[in-house]
Image (spheres, rainbow, N blue to C red):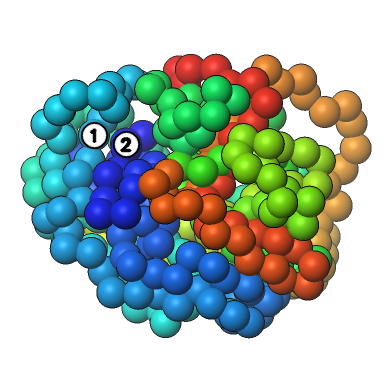
Amino acid sequence: MVLIRNVRGECTGTLVAPNLVVTARHCVSSSNLAVTCNDQGQAVSGGQAGVDYDPGKIAVFVGESFARKGVLDPAAVGARIVHDGSPTLCDHDVAFLVLSNPVTAPVAKLRLTAPPRVGERARAVGWGISVAKTPSDGRVARGGITVAHVGANASRATGPRELSATEGICDGDSGGPLLAESDGALLAVAARGGSPRAAKLAPPEACVGDDIVNVYVSLAAHTKTVRAAFRAAGAPEPEAPPDEPCTGLVCAAPATCQATASGATSCGVPANPGSGTPEASDGGGCSAVPSGAGRATTGAGGLVLGLGLFVARRRRRAQ
């Protein structure tokens, strides 16, 4: 994971090649952070994708700890920004930053052939606000997060290329990864979150609670952008999912099947998450708005969401 410092504040990102970082698009552009989205991936209000920042003014720091006091040289700065050019952040709040030079740090693997599943357990990692009410000096993680919905969902205000998950992130965790607990693969990027109740609170209280909805952008639903970014970085492209008529469990976009399974429900019907006892978690959380940008909120069908995600109750250092 990396810390991204832009002209507005700080975000989280994930190194997916030695010279390539994936993050939220609102972390690399002067976008409208107050957004109301619908389940078609359209903006009801706000959420306009703004002009990209000068990539050379976006600094990237690596390592498990980072001293925010004093002056530190970044591991790299941006050289190029890659995204799909959508005019709205809804359903498209993901971007890649090609770096000025390769950096020495662990590289995350992408899972594009098997998108997130409803009920899947995941982990969030970020540099955002913790229970101490300040940005963390060290990278923190929260495990035991559950993927609640995948794809278009009116009550969660998620579009076809998004998913929602339970409490786990806070301001400053924007652009951070949602990692599968099963194999550590990168599934999605933190975009926005909150609840009507939380909209009246300040972080970290605004980031916790059973009613919190965190929205992530699925990378398996943006494979064209993923491949374009890897080509721009001169890195080997990750394996892409099949592009065939939808007959399987999860569809990231209309008529495009991202995963198949015999006996699966038809497209657009949420899979049964199954039953069982939830795993215990001692984790804390992470966030989604640039930490210096203030807290923007957005309502969608009664759901208040903010482009600056959430911390959790108890946080532990990432491994």
Residue 201 lies in quadrant? top right
- The mark nearer the N terminus, 1 or 2, is 2
Tag 1 secondary structure:
strand
The residue at the point 28 percent across, 74 percent down is 51
Q: Position of residue 141 (x, y in %)?
A: 53, 27
For residue 13, above or below residue 216: above
Q: Quadrant of the N terminus?
A: top left
Name the foreground residue: 37 vs 91: 37
For residue 121, above or below residue 270: above
Residue 27 lies in quadrant? bottom left
Q: Which residue is mark 1?
A: 61
For residue 77, above or below residue 205: below
The residue at the point 56 percent across, 47 percent down is 309
What's under tag 1, amino acid-wise? Answer: Phe
Q: Position of residue 257 (x, y in %)?
A: 61, 70
Q: Position of residue 67 (x, y in %)?
A: 28, 22
The residue at the point 77 percent across, 38 percent down is 209
Q: Which residue is mark 2?
A: 2
Q: Quadrant of the C terminus?
A: top left
What's under tag 2, amino acid-wise? Answer: Val
Tag 2 secondary structure:
strand
- Judge from the rendering whether residue 27 lies leftward or rightward of residue 267; answer left or right: left
Label 1 and label 2: CA atoms lie apart by 6 Å
Query: Which labelled disc corresponds to residue 144?
Result: none
Check disc 2: other Cα within 10 Å, few if <14, some if 14-19, many if 20+. many
Q: How many marks?
A: 2
Q: Does the image show residue 223?
A: no
Name the foreground residue: 156 vs 108: 156
- Judge from the rendering whether residue 160 lies leftward or rightward of residue 195; answer left or right: left
Name the foreground residue: 23 vs 299: 299
Check disc 1: other Cα within 10 Å, few if <14, some if 14-19, many if 20+. many
Q: Do callouts 1 and 2 mark residues in contact (Cβ within 8 Å)?
A: yes
